[in-house]
Amino acid sequence: MALNMKFISAFILLVGLNVNAQEELYMRQGLIKTTASIAPSTMLNRSVNNIYLSGFLEYHIEKNISFRGDCYWFVDGKIKNPSSELFVRQAMRVYFGPYFHKNVKNWDNYIGLQPGIALMRPLNEQLDHAPLQASPSFAVHVGSTYFVWKFFNFYVDLAYVSSVYHGFSTGGQRTDELILSAGLGFQLNTKKAK
């Protein structure tokens, strides 16, 4: 019974915030958005799933154009089947680039392209003392954000990240991943609505 009352109270609060959000449009020039979340990924070149701590900081130079920096910090990995093996021992990915937005009231859909750098050390018996290696990387993002109040939003973001680790006897190893992040985001408008 108490759980039902909490659920009903939370639902009423969200509906009330949503009604308030419909009165004011939050997507505009000067908007700053940020978030931090746990982001699962799947490696595209091997049967491994990874977990990252992810976060971003974004600034809108126009309503439909922004620049965003993303960071991914490797936490752990898990193999998908017994015949595969983990690949990453340490990793961090950092990206910065433009995003293009299509807005419908307080609903924002976007695509972004970011060059960046991947710092990675593999977990491999052949490279037991492998160095932490920096390599060029890029990320392509698609996602959606819904603004529910002037200070927070809900978002979902899918990133394709691409890089190569060099140094194996067989040549470079691709470390491409799909990374999904979602949750609660925060924003602040630095300019007043016209």
Image: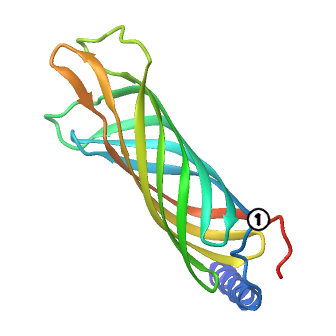
Residue 173 image offset from top left, x and y in percent: 24, 28
Q: Residues within 10 Å of mark 1 (few under 14, many from 20)?
A: some
> Where residue 15 appears, x then y in whole percent?
68, 89
Residue at 73% across / 69% down in the picture? Answer: 29
Q: Is residue 155 above or below residue 114?
A: below
Image height of 94 relative to 5, above or below: above
Query: Is residue 8 left or right of 157 when viewed as pictured?
Result: right
Q: Identify the residue at horizontal 32%, vertical 39% (top origin).
A: 78
Callout 1 amino acid:
Gly
Q: Quadrant of the C terminus?
A: bottom right
The spot of residue 9 in percent (x, y) is 72, 84
Question: Which residue position holds label 1?
Answer: 30
**Nearer to us in this view, 38 or 44:** 44
Q: What residue is drawn where x is 60% and y is 52%?
A: 68
SS state under label 1: loop
Residue sticking out furthest to the right: 192
Give the position of the N terminus as an image quadrant.
Answer: bottom right
Using the rendered view, name the quadrant where residue 176 is placed: top left
Q: How many marks?
A: 1
